[in-house]
Amino acid sequence: MNSLNLDNLTTERRNEKTFGLDEMSVAEALDLMNQEDRNVPAAVAESLPEIEGVIEQTIQSFKKGGRLIYMGAGTSGRLGVLDAAECVPTFGVSPELVIGLIAGGSEAMTVAVEGAEDSLTLGQEDLEQLALNENDMVIGIAASGRTPYVIGGLDYARSVGASTGSISCNKNAEVSRHAQYPIEVDCGPEFLTGSTRLKSGTAQKLILNMISTISMIGIGKVYNNLMIDVKPTNEKLVERSKRIIMEATEVDYETAAAYFVEAEQNVKLAIVMILTQSDKETAQQKLNKADGFVRKTL
């Protein structure tokens, strides 16, 4: 790992299709980039069985009171932080349930922190600060599949009994040997040689979308295809909340708005009140008994 031998990494190979890139017109480069991007979903599709395993384990971790923790460096770390942050308004969860760690800390979200990703101990230190335990799920994200920050973190996670997964964009990745549930996606050489914020970043984003969204479905954060635990933190989300109540229960806008207020802006609670014709307290009891799954209250 210390030899920095990148010769065998797909993410570092030159893409023969983009030779002469600097001589292409904008239209030519744009068309070629779009063609290369189309390969990403197909590459992700080949890893669906492995992604399924990660999601199943994440759901189990949530049910045990554990957390989902992403960790990565550079683009990989930023994508993990982004996915974690979006879980809060989308699914109404605490910021402590899904956490994104990036090598170098919050400063590294916008400015590269020299040497942070090369530390085998920094990942462990970041996880220790979170009081990592055996109920948690740690997913290391590394396009190259060899990032020391991620590998060190995964090794520490396994030492305390936490579940571990990894996402890399090279086959036979080093990081896969340090995770119980490895995911490897080969999108081919990048459009711009070595720029893993492109196809590799897109692949990682697609996989993170899958992991967080479907794991949240698995703990009752979705009814039908509606995000019923959305947090109405602004005017747009307040209106979306009312529309979700309308869609879930087939009531009119005025009725949805009234129940939204009565439920103290708790969309899920308002839906159960309407569907089960219950007052707020009874609806909450039904939800508690159903572990938060709306469908189980019916």
Image (cartoon, rainbow, N blue to C red):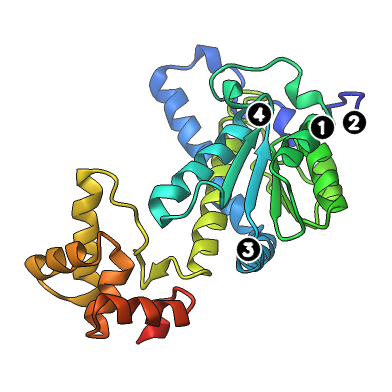
Q: Are marks 1 and 3 in contact (CB under 8 Å)?
A: no
Say which label, 1 or 3, has the lower sequence index. 3
Alpha-carbon span between mark 1 and mark 2:
8 Å
Q: Quadrant of residue 27?
A: top left
- Could you tell me which residue is drawn at 60 percent across and 22 percent down? 108
- Could you tell me which residue is drawn at 71 percent across and 33 percent down? 11
Alpha-carbon span between mark 1 and mark 3:
28 Å
Alpha-carbon span between mark 2 and mark 4:
24 Å
Q: Position of residue 156 (x, y in %)?
A: 84, 45
Say which label, 2 or 3, has the lower sequence index. 2
Residue behind mark 4: 15
Q: Is residue 220 above or below residue 133?
A: below
Say which label, 1 or 4, has the lower sequence index. 4
Which secondary structure, mark 4?
Answer: loop
Residue behind mark 1: 148
Choose mark 2 or mark 4, whichever is in front.
2
Residue behind mark 2: 1
Alpha-carbon span between mark 2 and mark 3:
35 Å
